[in-house]
Image: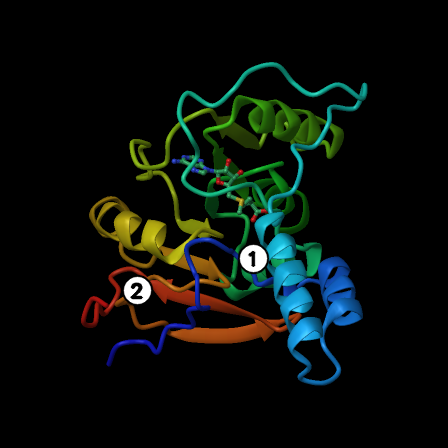
Amino acid sequence: MPLSVLQPADADAVLVPAVERGRRARLFRLFAPQRRGGGVRGLAIVVAALLLGGCATAIPRLADGSVAAGEPARTPDVYYEPSPPEVVEAMLKLANVGPGDVVYDLGSGDGRIPIAAARDFGARGVGIEIDPRLVAVARENAAQAGVGDRVTFRGEDFFEADLSGASVVTLFLFPSINRRLAPRLLAQLKPGSRVIGHYHAVPGWTPDARIRVRGRPLYRWTIPVQAGATN
Ligand SMILES: C[S@@+](CC[C@H](N)C(=O)[O-])C[C@H]1O[C@@H](n2cnc3c(N)ncnc32)[C@H](O)[C@@H]1O
């Protein structure tokens, strides 16, 4: 049976709606209309649109305060937005990550998921990231966390990357991107590998586990997945 996929109104424009994110949620509540007056409501809609438009998080700086050199070779498919630490921990627990695992994060940002997999779960981690500035930050973060020898960051496009070494894959991406990645995951991952989705599901896949952390849905699928109808 296909998963009833949680899709916000504009799922491919916003990873997590502003109303569910702490800092911006407080701002949103501040400006939200208390009664349905036309002018106030209109102002609230404009403010909400501005807040939603500013969802991406700035590229983190290196330890010396500089932004790493370089630009992505092409426009990334998803903007940079880090998973909160509690969500990272819950994703890795949901995957039952252990010392025998190799955790691939597709679109690895500042490297927090592969780094946590190595530091807190004894696994090895691989990050695939298209933005060289984030790859530089992630490598520095891995060295600072003392796991530089067990974590690798590859400056690659996840649509072209070799994923066959993974036993766990994590995704915090738009639904349309998850859908495009699905055939690659099915073709390249070994049976028994786990795929973990943060907030957005893989359309058409039925999860074998689903939990909520900080109000955000997390999904687990095990390869081979029981693919449902594509939607
Ligand atoms: C929403 S962030 C998730 C960051 C990290 N996985 C986390 O959960 O904290 C998505 C990341 O995917 C990267 N990205 C977007 N398109 C990509 C592509 N085609 N190949 C590799 N990385 C990509 C972006 O640069 C961004 O860092």
Q: Distance between the Cα atoms at labels 2 and 1?
A: 21 Å
Q: Nearer the viewer, residue 218 or 117?
A: 218
Describe the element under mark 1 as helix, strand or loop. Answer: helix
Question: Which residue is drawn at the image coordinates 63% and 69% (left, top)?
Answer: 42
Q: Nearer the viewer, residue 179 or 21?
A: 21
Tell me if residue 190 can be seen: no
Image side of residue 126 versus residue 203, left or right:
right
Type of amino acid at the residue the image marks with label 1: Leu
Residue named by callout 2: 203
Residue 32 vertical placement versus 153 (above, below): below
Residue 146 vertical placement versus 201 (above, below): above
Describe the element under mark 2 as helix, strand or loop. Answer: loop
Residue 151 vertical placement versus 116 (above, below): above
Residue 209 is tagged as none
Residue named by callout 1: 92
Type of amino acid at the residue the image marks with label 2: Pro
Where's the C terminus, which quadrant? bottom left
Question: Which residue is drawn at the image coordinates 52% and 19% (left, top)?
Answer: 71
Relative image position of residue 206 (x, y in whole percent): 31, 72
Closest to the camera, between mark 2 and mark 1, is 2
Image side of residue 170 versus residue 117, left or right:
left
Q: Which image quarter: residue 62? A: top right
Image side of residue 190 versus residue 200, left or right:
left
* Colour convention of the picture: rainbow
Question: Which residue is drawn at the image coordinates 21% and 50% (left, top)?
Answer: 183
The residue most toward the bottom is 35
